[in-house]
Image (spheres, helix red, strand yellow):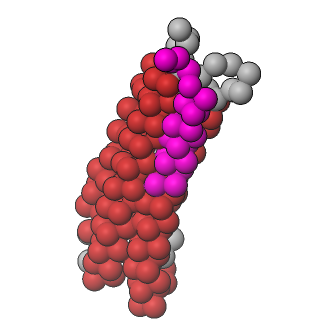
Amino acid sequence: MSSCPPYAPFFGFAGVASAMVFSTVGAAYGTSKAGIGIAGLGQFKPELVMKSLIPVVMSGIIAVYGLVVSVLIAGGLDPAVDYPLFSGFIHLGAGLACGFTGLAAGYAIGIVGDACVRAYVQESRIFVAMVLILIFSEVLGLYGLIVALIMNTRASGLKCS
């Protein structure tokens, strides 16, 4: 049995799709959930809206992580070059690692962003704590990006036997 079956690129493309889809779903959830809190805040204190956009920006960064991993994996997929099954599995794992951590980070940013923005209306001292919690939530997605990058480097240079 060949180590370069014709279906091997499917797993690489599944990694591309999963990195992009799951991380953007997390980013969309984080943006929408935090945006609801910002809209509520804007009714009472419109001057605080610009400072409260931090969760929305951080959610957008999660989608960028998925984009970076997707582009890197897609760069390793070339129809003119044999593609080992092992590379397909590595790319799938990298995409899932980035996608699922992006999904988790987006959910965390959305929930924390909504709650903290609503609390920020009542007490302005909560802002620093909000930013710290959001940073720790964002780091979840960054961990997935780092693991995906490490995995992607393992897939380069593999040959079929």
Q: Is residue 121 above or below residue 80?
A: below
- 127 vs 44, left or right, is left
Report the number of numbered marks: 0
Instruction: Please name the residue shown 56% across and 38% down the image.
Output: 10
Look at the image and give the residue range highlighted in magenta: 1-22
Residue 153 screen position, x and y as percent:
48, 21
Q: Is residue 149 visible?
A: no
Does residue 10 belong to the magenta stretch?
yes
Q: Quadrant of residue 72?
A: top right
Residue 104 place in picture, x, y as percent: 34, 56
User: Is the magenta region chiefly helix, strand or loop?
Assistant: helix
Residue 8, horizontal then vertical, whole percent: 55, 30
Residue at (46% x, 55% y) in the render: 22
Can see residue 90?
Answer: yes
Q: Quadrant of residue 75?
A: top right
Q: Between residues 127 and 155, which one lies in front from this camera angle?
A: 155
Seen at 31% across and 61% down, the residue is: 108
Above/below status of 105 relative to 75: below
Residue at coordinates 41% horizontally, 83% vertically from top-left? 41
Name the one closer to the observer, 22 or 38: 22
User: Residue lying furthest top in this view?
Assistant: 161
Whether the magenta-drawn stretch holds residue 141 is answered as: no
- Residue 126 lies left or right of residue 105; in this view the side is left
- The spot of residue 73 in percent (x, y) is 57, 33
Residue sticking out furthest to the bottom? 43
Residue situated in front as seen by the camera: 106 or 80: 80
Residue 128 vs 16, above or below: the answer is below
